[in-house]
Amino acid sequence: MPPTISIVTPCLNAAATIGRTLDSVASQSYPGIEHIVVDGGSTDGTLEILAQFPGVKVISEPDEGLSDAVNKGIALATGELVGWLNADDWYLPGALAAVAEAAEANPGAEWFTGGCPIVDGKGNKIRGGVTAYKNFLLGRYSFPLYLSQNFISCPATFIRASALEAVGPLRLDYSYSMDYDLFLRLARRGDPVILQRDLAVFAMAEGTKSMTGFDKQFSEHAEQARAHGQGHRFAVAANAVVSQMIIAAYRLLRLARRSG
């Protein structure tokens, strides 16, 4: 029996993008999909858009941030596999069927991931070099390598519900990189199954958390590597160095854009 899949989408005032996200789930050629949207109290028309998708389960109430919203959705999920798709990202055609096939073929595996190109606010592919670099590392996955830097993309990752129950919820004290912390907990239990295809698209537009909290995100990466890197001190040290290098490079790029 093919596994059922629950998708959790946290959102707040996402009217500009959530329609595309919802469409990407609804158009998947796979039965047994449950889509749960956890809204933090939107006032921009998001709820009206959600009402156009009667198959979507919607919770709308104040929350304590992104981690809290995702935790609420996971707690309500009934699927055997759970995916976390933010309200500005989307799945590619056939993604869920491919994940389900991998899950059936690897019954002992607890999590699954694949490629995830990056786009700007208009949907144009950007940072192709970053995507190629992450795919290169993904194809050579090992736990020490993953400790050294985060190259697994959240929108393209799916986890067995039993594994999520075992490792516990997202931590509320992380503001930007709560997914890396969760994935490292999973990684200590076992390697992911890596699908040789793109599964989702990650939107990186000005004003989003990924753009506004870059420095804090990579500081959290280094902290999380230290927390989960027992027995791998060289990988942990590499994470600290790589994180600082990426922060420095980003600051230079930002400065160049301003001066240009």
Image: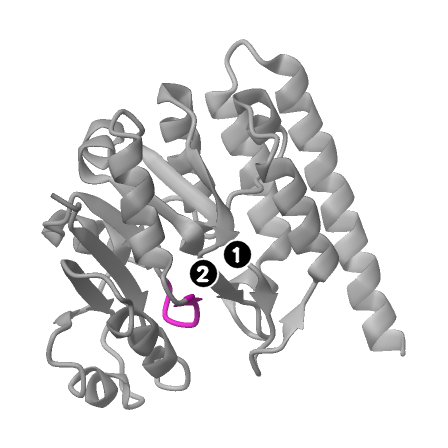
Q: Is residue 97 magenta?
A: no
> How would you rate the neighbour count of disc 2 (Cα within 10 Å): few for under 14, some for 14-19, many for 20 or more?
many
Q: Is residue 90 magenta?
A: yes
Which label belongs to residue 200? 2
Looking at the image, residue 37 sits to the left or right of residue 116; the answer is left
Where is residue 193 shown, x and y percent of the image?
Answer: 41, 34
Where is residue 148 shown, x and y percent of the image?
Answer: 63, 29
Query: Is 196 placed above or below 33 here?
Result: above
> Where, quadrant-wise, is the N terminus in this rendering?
top left
Q: CA distance from mark 2 to mark 1?
A: 5 Å
* Numbered circles on residues, count: 2
Can see residue 84? no
At label 1, the amino acid type is Cys
Circle 2 SS class: strand
Q: N-terminal of the two: label 2 or label 1?
A: 1
Q: Quadrant of residue 109?
A: top left
Between residues 232 and 160, which one lies in front from this camera angle?
Answer: 160
Tell me if label 2 and label 1 are in contact, CB under 8 Å.
Answer: yes
Where is residue 123 shown, x and y percent of the image?
Answer: 56, 78
At label 2, the amino acid type is Ala
Q: Which residue is mark 1?
A: 116
Q: Quadrant of residue 178?
A: top left
The part of the chain drawn in magenta is: 86-92
Circle 1 SS class: loop
Query: Is 232 placed above or below 160 here?
Result: above
Q: Main secondary structure of the magenta part?
A: loop
Between residues 115 and 17, which one lies in front from this camera angle?
Answer: 115
